[in-house]
Amino acid sequence: MSDTDTTTGPNAADEGNDLRTPIVAVLGHVDHGKTSLLDKIRGSTVIDGEAGAITQHIGATAVPLDVISDIAGSLIDPSDFDLPGLLFIDTPGHHSFSTLRSRGGALADIAVLVVDVNDGFQPQTLEALDILKRTQTPFVVAANKIDTTPGWNPQEDTPTLQTIEAQSERAENTLNQRLYEVIGELSDNGFSADMYWRVQDFRGNIGVVPVSALTGEGVPDLLTVLMGLSQRYMKEDMAVDLTGPGAGTVLEVKDERGFGTTLDVVLYDGVIRTDDTVVVGAKNDPIVTEVRALLQPRPLAEIRTEKRFEQVDAVTAAAGVKIAAPDLDDALAGAPVRVVRGRPEEEVVAEVEAELADIEVDTAENGIVVKADTLGSLEAIANALDEAEVPIVRAEVGDVAPRDVAVASTADDPKHEVILAFNVEVLPDAAQQAEDRDIRVFSDDVIYQLVDEYDEFVSEIERAQQ
Ligand code: GDP
């Protein structure tokens, strides 16, 4: 992205549309501090009662502009901004990131890639980078755990790649050096990067913001960079008709006492109201149903005495909401949800079908069986397998069931007598049958590890055949 990258049309915001909150996802390697960072952002924004307050949504946390400006102090002049704030998706990790799709892209408008400065780029960092590249999602790097490293010296000038070598020799094993390494790794992966201590200017490069999720140092800078990035590069995309029919993505399909099967949804467009007819992507045909209740979490203070949720009449994008409605049992995590309003129902059903077909994985006549917990993760694995030239015979959302073992048993190549299970259970019957029929089941919740395990298995077979 660069300063000249203003590809979207003329000021959509000036044509009667409203600006919605940008949706932010947090990615990174395990233990690099994603959860802590989200907690810190939530924590540091709860304290102040003067400014507005953050609002807890289903699956997300909204941090309004006045709160960000309060935290960021002199870093931000709120009058420079007209976006309403930031909506952080509460479940960190690229797994949820790739699950969450909106029309043709990632649901998150912007991402924070968390990198532990002591640990540098790790496999899941690279995997996250790949996904961010593929989905063309703008992101900021949070270089985390700076409290654990000695010797940070804020530089007068923003370091450039050319200065890295010279600097790093002098600053061996200090925070500076580790930050240079992060910048170097970004560069190795095709991104140019700038380092921020105190926020300067977003110049189209990837911002690397040193932070500590423990002490909160750098969090104001991070929020400032995110807000600046959104305002500068995403304002056009945020201009939507907030009175139009709602569109969202299913985060989770959950049983909720008193409500039956419910959907946790992140709404990225329009408004959803009680009694609206909605179309939801499902295992077979899309579900058409009527919203019985829209639920949001109650403020923490009230939870002890009251029920966990409060009912609201309407929810406007961007927001996280729980939808209670009949017939939701077959709904799929990662599938689209659309409100039918002012258009023929069939048209909306056809749209949801088309969106689902878009996520569906191409299968071959011969290949392995893949099971995953959501459509998005299924797609992510299929992409990884496609790159590794591994054909897939069956790709489905759900636990590994006897039917999957039956399909794997019909393979005419030992390399295909395999089931890859991503973040799902292997049902006991299926496990037994797999053992009886000598079908290998690989289970993991990290895509590259799953693909690696399969590669290793294929190498073993090939060695045995020689
Ligand atoms: P996640 O797996 O990426 O969500 O990582 P967590 O947020 O669970 O953090 C992993 C560990 O690192 C936990 O023990 C945290 O307390 C610790 N941690 C996270 N951020 C920081 C930080 O900025 N400084 C220090 N010292 N520890 C941190």
Image (tube, rainbow, N blue to C red):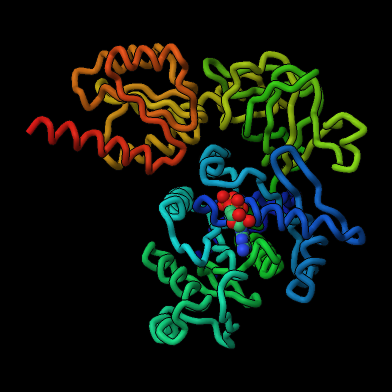
- Residue 142 in sight from this viewpoint: yes
Which residue is depicted at the point 10% across and 30% down? Answer: 465
Left-right relation of 342 to 26: right
Q: Is residue 187 above or below residue 122?
A: below
Quadrant of res 70: bottom right
Residue at 64% from the left image edge and 22% from the top image edge: 279
Q: Is 55 situated left or right of 289 in this image? A: right
What residue is at 77 percent from the left and 40 percent from the top?
A: 316
Q: Quadrant of the C terminus?
A: top left
Which of 259 and 14 lies nearest the eye of the viewer? 259
Horizontal arrangement in the rendering, residue 316 relative to residue 226 (left or right): right
Where's residue 257, x and y in %?
77, 20
x 36%, y 40%: residue: 384
- Residue 4 seen in the figure: no
- Residue 31, position in %: x, y? 54, 53
Image spot of residue 295 (x, y percent): 80, 30
